[in-house]
Amino acid sequence: MSETVDFYSSNKFKLILLTAMVLQNTSVVLLGRYTNGGVPEEDRYVINHLIVVTECCKLLMSCGFEYYTTNGQLMNSIQENIIKRPTDALKISIPAMLYLLQNTLLYVALANLAAPIFQVTYQGKLVTTAVMSVIMLNRKYSLQQWICLVSLGFGVAVVVLDKEDGDKDDSAAKEGQSMKIGLMSVTVACLSSALAGVYFEKVIKGVGSKEKTKPVSVWMRNIQLAFFSIITGFIQGQYSKEGPSAVAGQHYLHGFSKWAWLLIFLQAGGGMLVAAVIKYADNVLKGLATGVSVCVGTGMSFLIFGTYISFQFVVGAGIILTSVYFFSNPIKKQPSGDGEVLPK
């Protein structure tokens, strides 16, 4: 048993999580771009339907992990944490609605932006998350981290103001894609992602809570989150007129090709990866995974889609990656001979 615990806390396991997150992040962006922006409109899936099916997969996966960690006591766990504590479970409905908004906007952004631009501009969520953490969790950041946040915003601006991309990507214009809609979607998605993530962390860690009850597992919180996401997704779908199936009366899974199903699996698995990182690693790992996935995704987009990458984009992406790295990895200090602390 001790060997298992040591493995989960080892650098080897963290490296496995890092590799998995990089592959998952990169694959989701590329597949989302391909399945929603690279096919005729009449053959596209409805984004809301894809999200609901993805949340159903997350619910099943979370139930499986909860069943395993409780030694087969899944139903007892549901009884204790949901049925007997409905008010506590309802807390998760707030991030569920915010995550639904975020996921919807991300697919809209992917349909209107090239994969490299999307990945880089989406790093703006680091800024919004930091601000939300200060407001909601009373978290403190060092001067180095605030400098990184400012430089990250500058890097995003450099990428967005790259006019050459719009001039040379004629295929995007032919497909009716809009840079303005894509950037607006990314901006709101960053805000909703930050608010949902920080609120979810606050609930999981019980920050500000005065209740003296047994803490709820990450997997049970994921079950609650997926459940409320499915409910809100269905409600939204009833009033949405998005996509061809909404107007032509086509079946719910219209446009779900094998690539769309792979995207669903990757998105659902990504939810489990985030939970694993929260439990076994830390935010440093998430920052590293995000930065590496931008580089990998940009290279793959160039090879697969032939996306033009200008020098200005490379400069902006370099600023962002550097900012993300130093935000998550403070510069170490060492004591001087007279007891003062000097930068290393």
Image (tube, rainbow, N blue to C red):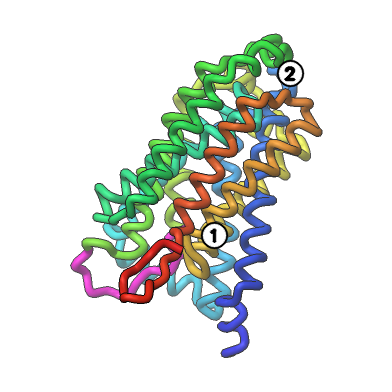
Which of these two is toward me, 152 or 17?
Answer: 152
Magenta residues span: 209-222
Q: What residue type is labelled 2?
A: Pro
> Label 1's element?
helix
**Mark 2 or mark 1, which is nearer the start of the sequence?**
2
> Label 2's element?
loop
Q: Work out which residue is located at the far bottom of the displayed protein and give it.
A: 2
Q: Does the magenta stretch include residue 216?
A: yes
The residue singled out by tag 2 in the image is 40
Say whether residue 236 is visible: no
Which of these two is toward me, 125 or 142?
Answer: 142
Above or below, comparing residue 64 to residue 41 in the picture: below
The residue singled out by tag 1 in the image is 285
Say whether residue 88 is visible: yes
In this image, 160 relative to 151: left or right?
right
Residue name at image x 65 percent, y 18 percent: 165
Q: Tell me the CA gap for discs 1 and 2.
A: 38 Å
Q: In which quarter of the image is residue 35?
A: top right
Disc on res. 245: none
In this image, 258 relative to 25: left or right?
right
